[in-house]
């Protein structure tokens, strides 16, 4: 049985919990996926993101309850090991690991798409370098990695909040030279119920990182309060930005353009950030995208 001296230091605050959950969610699910998802269901992709956010609630509540009852490093593996034995814990742990591997790979694809806007960057060497860098950072400790996570998430949420506010004013407030709504909202369900339900499954990956904080629960100060509150605030932030942001993309971009676009946030931002000097708006979006992809790791 482990002794108290073997316990990890409790360095993580409420904002650290929020940063871990938020950073783990935002990546290709917002910066790359909306155009692909919109091709499957049309404008109802907006509603698909909202429904997917509601569907993650049971998982969030369960993980918050387990993390506060057993605040130990290991997350899903530890919970399954205690409840069902080592075999179940191993299978669940491997499943979680594979899910994070595929999600990180998807994030690297998105990073390449956004970096390619300004430079031709080879994806494989970049992926290997980032894997090593974040691996070393996580070995050093949660406190050090959480400092970087705080910075990245603060940049990310700040820029996306600005994007959402400016986009709403431009599209529905008439405060932009973009000409208002260029996209199409009818028919809302272009592929019927089947396409809509399939799209919910596609965009659900956008929320997959919400429960990642369970793996660092042992290092959280006052876990009974900070874990559920941090996860809840993170989900509210992500859902609001996803729904508002995707609605802006659908409104700004013609359907045919949106469906083929791998950088829809950048493309839509170019339209209503045209008042900023030196193309600063699109640059901010690329910076936010890089912060999102980096914080996912």
Image (cartoon, helix red, strand yellow):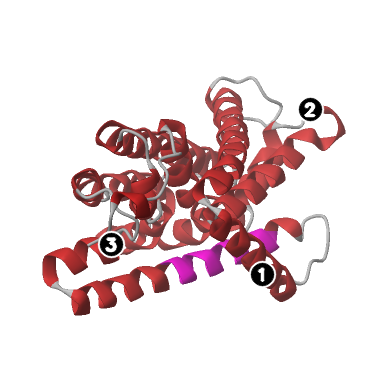
In the displayed structure image, the side of residue 126 where residue 95 appears, left or right: left
Q: Please state which of residues 81 and 99 is positioned toward the viewer in this rendering.
A: 81
Asked if the magenta segment contains residue 78, the reply would be: no
Q: Among all residues in the image, which is located at the extreme right?
A: 278
* Front: mark 2 or 1: 1
| Upstream in sequence: badge 2 or badge 3 | 3
Q: Where is residue 156 shown, x and y percent of the image?
A: 59, 39
Q: Main secondary structure of the magenta part?
A: helix
| 105 inside magenta stretch | yes
Tell me if 124 is positioned left or right of 95 in this view.
right
Residue identifier under label 3? 76
Which quadrant is the N terminus positioned in? bottom left
Residue drawn at point x = 62 percent, y = 37 percent? 151
Q: Residue 226, image x and y in percent? A: 33, 33
The residue range painted magenta reads 100-113
Residue 178 occupies quadrant: top right
């Amino acid at each position: 049985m482990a002794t108290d001296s073997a316990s990890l230091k409790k360095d993580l605050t409420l904002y650290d919990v929020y940063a871990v959950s938020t950073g783990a969610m935002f990546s290709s699910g917002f910066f790359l996926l909306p155009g692909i998802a919109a091709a499957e269901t049309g404008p109802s992709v907006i509603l698909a993101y909202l429904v997917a956010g509601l569907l993650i609630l049971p998982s969030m509540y369960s993980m918050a309850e387990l993390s506060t009852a057993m605040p130990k490093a290991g997350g899903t593996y530890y919970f399954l090991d205690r409840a069902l034995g080592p075999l179940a814990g191993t299978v669940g742990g491997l499943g979680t690991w594979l899910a994070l591997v595929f999600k990180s790979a998807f994030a690297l694809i998105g990073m390449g798409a956004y970096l390619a806007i300004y430079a031709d960057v080879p994806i494989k060497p970049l992926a290997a370098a980032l894997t090593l860098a974040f691996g070393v950072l996580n070995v050093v400790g949660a406190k050090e990695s959480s400092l970087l996570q705080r910075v990245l998430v603060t940049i990310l949420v700040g820029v996306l909040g600005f994007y959402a506010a400016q986009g709403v004013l431009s599209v529905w407030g008439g405060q932009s030279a973009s000409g208002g709504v260029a996209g199409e909202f009818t028919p809302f369900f272009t592929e019927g119920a089947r396409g809509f339900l399939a799209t919910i499954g596609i965009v659900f990956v956008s929320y997959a990182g919400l429960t990642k904080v369970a793996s660092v629960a042992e290092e959280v100060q006052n876990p009974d309060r900070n874990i559920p509150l941090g996860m809840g605030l993170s989900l509210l932030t992500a859902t609001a930005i996803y729904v508002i942001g995707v609605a802006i993309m659908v409104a700004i971009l013609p359907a045919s353009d949106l469906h083929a676009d791998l950088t829809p946030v950048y493309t839509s931002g170019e339209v209503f950030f045209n008042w900023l000097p030196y193309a600063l708006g699109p640059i901010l979006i690329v910076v936010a995208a890089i912060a999102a992809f980096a914080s996912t790791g």
